[in-house]
Image: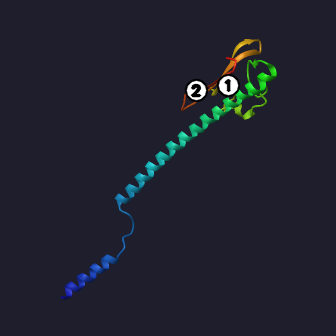
Amino acid sequence: MSFLHLIASCYNCINMTKQKNGFTVLELTFVITVALIASVVFFIQKHNLEILVQDNTRKTAINAMYYGLEEVFYPTNKYYPRTISKDNLKSVDPTLFTDPNGIKFGEIGGSYTYKPTNCDGDKCQGYSLQANLVNEADYIKQSKNN
């Protein structure tokens, strides 16, 4: 074996044991692309989950008002009120009269609507409760007497 072969052989051994430092541009591009895609998917799902929670909160509020009217108010008074509020539906949690956007019941732009029917003064024979939902059709509950 010649002296040059020996030097070339040692040079190859040195190069094989040498470690690379850093990442290639292709590796960095791949990792950044995957991270961007994952973050976009995360934020889309987070937004969808927030909307689902808000819609379920609206349904819960309408159900509470409905049962407050049907199980407490009507049996006691034998009529439905012309308007509803935390004052005449004391069995309903007062926080439910504010929608997930912070708008109080009966204010313009709110999610909840109460429409009394067949009224004589402040005494009504029926009603319709409605919540405007984002991902589904509006959620409507009507009095048992309708």
In which quadrant is the N terminus drawn?
Answer: bottom left
Q: What residue type is labelled 1?
A: Glu
Residue 120 position in % (x across, y down): 75, 11
Check the image and name the residue furthest to the right.
Answer: 76
Residue 58, quarter of picture: top right
Residue 7, quarter of picture: bottom left
Q: Which of marks 1 and 2 is nearer the N terminus?
A: 1
| Vertical comparison of 107 with 27: above or below | above
Residue 96 position in % (x across, y down): 70, 33
**Residue on which disc 2 sits:** 138
Question: In screen coordinates, is 89 left or right of 8?
Answer: right
Which class describes the residues within 10 Å of circle 2: few (<14), some (14-19), or many (20+)? some
| Local secondary structure at mark 1 | loop
Residue 18, quarter of picture: bottom left
Q: CA–CA distance between discs 1 and 2?
A: 18 Å
x 37%, y 73%: residue: 19
Check the image and name the residue furthest to the top.
Answer: 120
Q: What residue type is labelled 2?
A: Asp
| Residue 4 appears in the picture as rendered | yes
x 27%, y 79%: residue: 12
In which quadrant is the C terminus drawn?
Answer: top right
Residue 16 position in % (x across, y down): 31, 76
What label does residue 122 carry, if any? none
Question: In screen coordinates, is 103 left or right of 8?
Answer: right
| Local secondary structure at mark 2 | loop
What label does residue 107 carry, if any? 1
x 63%, y 32%: residue: 59
Residue 108 position in % (x across, y down): 65, 24
x 73%, y 20%: residue: 83
